[in-house]
Image (cartoon, rainbow, N blue to C red):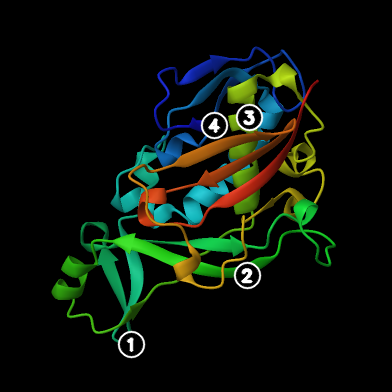
Amino acid sequence: MTLGLVLKDTSKLVGKCIYCGSIENLSNEHVIPYGLGANLTLIDASCSKHRDITSRFEGEVLRKQFINLRTTQKFPSRHKNNRPEYFEFIINGEKKIVPVEDCPTMFMMLWFLEPRSISDYSYDKGIGVTGTSTHGKNLEVFQKKYAVREFAFSQDLGSDFARLIAKIAYCSAVFRYGLDSLEDVNILPSIKGEKDDIGYWVGCPINYKSGEDIPLAEIYSHKIEVIEDNGHIRVKVRLFANYRTPEYLVIVGKLKK
């Protein structure tokens, strides 16, 4: 099943925290963060404690890795007054301050090893990063206005991107099957920050060697595929797939028999 593309119903009532089971002080949980322009929502699905945890690492990624994209493309924000008014670029060897209205859309994505749980390599903790790719648009106007022969930009990719992908995949599985249908959800401690084993459950479906390995662009912004194989749940996640971004694979858990 593919979520986020053609679903009529974009919300599902849960009624308890999907991270701990609490029924107190519940709020809604977006499958993909609100700030990335998605609308799939789990209703009454996160307690105040875990809302704070997920909001913290989501905010880290949105404010760093995707800040240029979200600002130049006017993605939704609950803090519009805090948006940057310019970005720094190195243009023809010199640092330049470029107003947002002149900026190209630019962002980077990480490439990971395959999830350790389905692969075989030496593993201790964290996640193995094998490379990055740069994505963007609206370069022509920027290059012409600033007489750009060459340019560079820096970006803080943050340390929580893999946790964000894991959270999206887990929420997608809950949306698809319902919370009470899942068991052995081994990625939960990593999402909650209790374990540093995110690379065991999250990675890329193949080890990308070059940009040519990345799947072709989609017409949709975000693509989520929930796959059930003999009771085991895997979720493929592509954020901003219309920019020809990498795909990520998450080993979520099992369906109860």
CA neighbours of label 2 inside 10 A, class few (<14), some (14 to 19), many (20+): few
Q: Nearer the viewer, mark 4 or mark 1?
A: 4
Q: Identify the secondary structure beneath mark 1.
A: loop
Name the mark on residue 93. 1
Corner quadrant of residue 137: bottom left
Question: Which is more N-terminal, label 2 or label 1?
Answer: 1
Tags 1 and 2 in contact by the CB under 8 Å rule?
no
**Tag 3 residue:** 173
Report how far apart the C-alphas of labels 3 and 1 lie in the structure: 47 Å
Question: Which is more N-terminal, label 3 or label 2?
Answer: 2
Corner quadrant of residue 68: bottom left
Q: Is residue 87 left or right of residue 237?
A: left
Q: Is residue 110 left or right of residue 243?
A: right
Report how far apart the C-alphas of labels 1 and 2 lie in the structure: 28 Å
CA neighbours of label 1 inside 10 A, class few (<14), some (14 to 19), many (20+): few
**Tag 2 residue:** 130
Tags 4 and 1 in contact by the CB under 8 Å rule?
no
| Residue displayed at 32% across by 45% down | 219
Question: Which is more N-terminal, label 1 or label 4?
Answer: 4
Of residues 113 and 194, the one nearer the viewer is 113
Tags 2 and 4 in contact by the CB under 8 Å rule?
no
| Residue displayed at 18% across by 76% down | 146
Of residues 25 and 170, the one nearer the viewer is 170
| Residue displayed at 59% across by 58% down | 158
Q: Amino acid type of disc 1?
A: Gly
Q: Position of residue 170 (x, y in %)?
A: 65, 34
